[in-house]
Amino acid sequence: MNAFGSVRLAYRNETPADRGPHGELWARCSQSVDASGSPAGKPQWRLVNPARQLACMRQLRCQIGFCTAETDRGYVFLAGSAEGAAHRGGEPVRTAQPPVCLKHVRPAIELCPHLRKGHVAFRARATSLWGVVGSRYRLSALGLEPLPAEHDDAPVPYGHPQVGWFLASQLVRELRDYEVVNLDDLVPAT
């Protein structure tokens, strides 16, 4: 139960670190960190670490090196060619992929099997937190139960009435004031 008396999903031994920027509950997962407490190690593309993804998206850090991803003209976000083809120019783009710094644009494509098949690069001057991806639960007569997994890929926007019954695993940003860019214009091939 939250401070307003609403029932919601919670851990028995919950800490403030278990909640995201809008009070959503986050999946717990261990991760390697360096001496400064920053995520360390190579990203494992099929096994998105919720804590690392959340930190990269909240702080707009590079998904590869956890360094600042800001460029002099915004942030670079990569999407698979299928996701990029689905966007309509001028409309907001929603992504769960953290940005990449210019140093790591090409390594991101080389390391990610999904991006190697084709990609689109967006340079965004304005982004905002939009919602989360994860697993939905409900309270039934039998207790807490997950909803069917086919709903797990659909992002849930902040403010959605079910966000309190959601176990988040990825933060979604909405890109506005962006342009589709050619990577060769950003980072010349070596």
Image (cartoon, grey):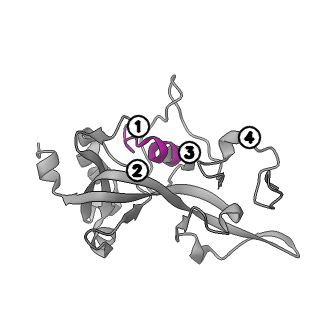
Q: Nearer the viewer, mark 3 or mark 4?
A: 4
Relative to 156, 182 lies left or right: left
Q: Quadrant of residue 72?
A: top left
**3 or 2: tag closer to the N-terminus:** 3
**3 or 4: tag closer to the N-terminus:** 4
Whole-angstrom CA distance, mark 3 to mark 1, is 12 Å
Where does label 4 land, which residue?
Answer: 15
Q: Which contiguous range is marked in magenta?
A: 54-66
Whole-angstrom CA distance, mark 2 to mark 1, is 10 Å
Q: Secondary structure at mark 2?
A: loop
> Which quadrant does the C terminus fall into?
top left
Where does label 3 land, which residue?
Answer: 51
Q: Nearer the viewer, mark 1 or mark 4?
A: 4
Relative to 79, 153 lies left or right: right
- Magenta span has 55? yes
> Which quadrant does the N terminus fall into?
bottom right
Residue found 29% across the figure and 57% down from its top:
177
Q: Which mark is residue 98?
A: 2
Badge 4 vs badge 2, beta-carbon distance below 8 Å:
no
Callout 1 amino acid:
Phe
Callout 3 amino acid:
Ala
**1 or 4: tag closer to the N-terminus:** 4
**3 or 1: tag closer to the N-terminus:** 3
